[in-house]
Image (cartoon, helix red, strand yellow):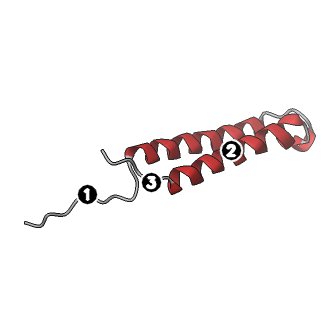
Amino acid sequence: MSNTKNNLPFGASNYKMMLIGLAVILGGFLIMSLDTEEFGFGLLGLTVGPVIVILGFIIEFWAILRKPVNS
């Protein structure tokens, strides 16, 4: 038969980092929803939540652009 390797675009560590990034993004949105100020204009809705969401997107981009580790 043919001698082809399993050339998947992502490794297991990439998928784990993607799931962690997704959890961080969802956590940021949850934190924004917990703000008790009217229309979400408090510290959680305007500062903490969006920073955590941006951090989650940074983790996602890093997980996508990172080379998979050959096992």
Q: Residue furthest bottom?
A: 2
Return the residue at label 2. Answer: 55
The amino acid type of the residue labelled 1 equals Asn
**Residue 53, percent from left and from top:** 70, 45
> Which mark, residue 67?
3
Residue that appears at 44% across and 47% down: 15
**Residue 39, percent from left and from top:** 89, 44
Image height check: is 1 above or below 37?
below
Q: Label 3, label 2: how many angstroms apart (C-alpha)?
A: 20 Å
**Residue 31, percent from left and from top:** 74, 35
Mark 1 or mark 2, earlier in chain: 1
The amino acid type of the residue labelled 2 equals Leu
The mark closer to the camera, 3 or 2, is 3
**In the rendered view, does 2 fall on the left or right side of 56?**
left
Circle 3 SS class: loop
Circle 1 SS class: loop
Residue that appears at 58% across and 44% down: 21
**Residue 32, percent from left and from top:** 78, 39
Give the quadrant of the N terminus.
bottom left
Q: Label 1, label 3: how many angstroms apart (C-alpha)?
A: 15 Å
**Of 62 and 50, the residue lying toward us:** 62
- Mark 3 surroundings: few (<14), some (14-19) or many (≥20) residues within 10 A: few
Return the residue at label 1. Answer: 6
The amino acid type of the residue labelled 3 equals Lys
Image height check: is 58 above or below 2?
above
Circle 2 SS class: helix
**Of 52 and 7, the residue lying toward us:** 7
